[in-house]
Amino acid sequence: MKQQIILKIVVDIGMTVMLLLLMTYELIGQAAHEWLGVGIFALFITHHILNRKWSQSVLKGKYTPLCIWQTVLVIGILFTIAGSMYSGVILSKHALLFLPIKGGRALAREIHMVSVYCGFVLMSLHLGFHWRMMMGMARRIIKELPSAGRWMLRGIAALVAGYGVYAFIRREIDHLSGACFTVIYIKSTP
C-alpha cells in the first residue's frame, strides 16, 4: 500500500480519536483539552493537504445530489471548525497563553459550544459517508481478520455509537443542534 494512503488513514484515525477525546472535557481537563485542540488543528491541516485533489476539483465535473450533499456537508464542517478554533483561541488559558487576548469570553464560549456540537454531528455524517471506503482500506491493511475479531470491532463501534446517542440525549444536545446557527445569530446581534 502506498505511503500516502497509509498516512491518510493514520491522520483520519488520529482526528477521530482526538475528536472523541476532546468531547471528554470533564475527564481530561482544560489544559489537555486545549493541547488536543491544537493537535487536531494540525491534523485537520494535514488532512486537507493530503486530500487537496478533492478541493481542487470541487467546481469541476457533474454534480449529483449526493455530491452536492457531501460538498455542503464539508463546507458546514469547515464553518464549525473555524468557529471552534476561533473561539478556542479566545478561550485558551494554557496552550495559547502567549496571545494577548482580552475579553469576549462569554460570546466565545457560546460560539465554541454551538460550533463543537454542530461540528460533531456534521463530522459524524461525513465519517458515515466515507465508512465503506475506510473499511475497504482497513481490509487491505488487515488482510485476514478472524470472524471473532470482526464481531468484536463491530461491537466496539456499536457501543461507541450507542454512547454517543445516550450522551446526545442526556446532555440535551438535540435542542442545541437544532438551533446551531440561530444561537450565533442571536448572540452576535447588538
Image: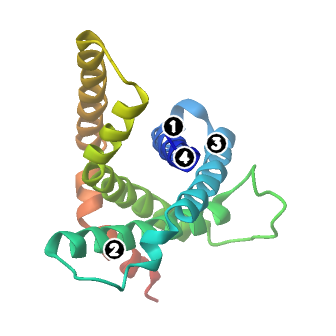
Q: Earlier in the sequence, mark 2 or mark 1?
A: 1
Q: Identify whether 151 is placed above or below 33.
A: above
Q: Identify whether 77 is placed above or below 146.
A: below
Residue occupied by mark 4: 11
Q: Amino acid at mark 1?
A: Leu
Seen from this angle, which residue lies furthest left? 65
Residue occupied by mark 3: 30
In terms of image quadrants, where is residue 68?
A: bottom left
CA–CA distance in space, label 3 to label 4: 24 Å
CA–CA distance in space, label 4 to label 1: 15 Å
CA–CA distance in space, label 2 to label 1: 25 Å
| Number of the front mark, 4 or 1 | 4
CA–CA distance in space, label 3 to label 1: 12 Å
Residue occupied by mark 2: 181
Instruction: Provide the secondary structure element on which disc 1 rests.
Output: helix
Q: Earlier in the sequence, mark 4 or mark 2?
A: 4
Residue at 38% x, 33% y: name it: 140
Q: Amino acid at mark 3?
A: Gln
Q: Amino acid at mark 4?
A: Val
Residue occupied by mark 1: 21
10 Å crowding of disc 3: few (<14), some (14-19), many (20+): some
Instruction: Provide the secondary structure element on which disc 2 rests.
Output: helix
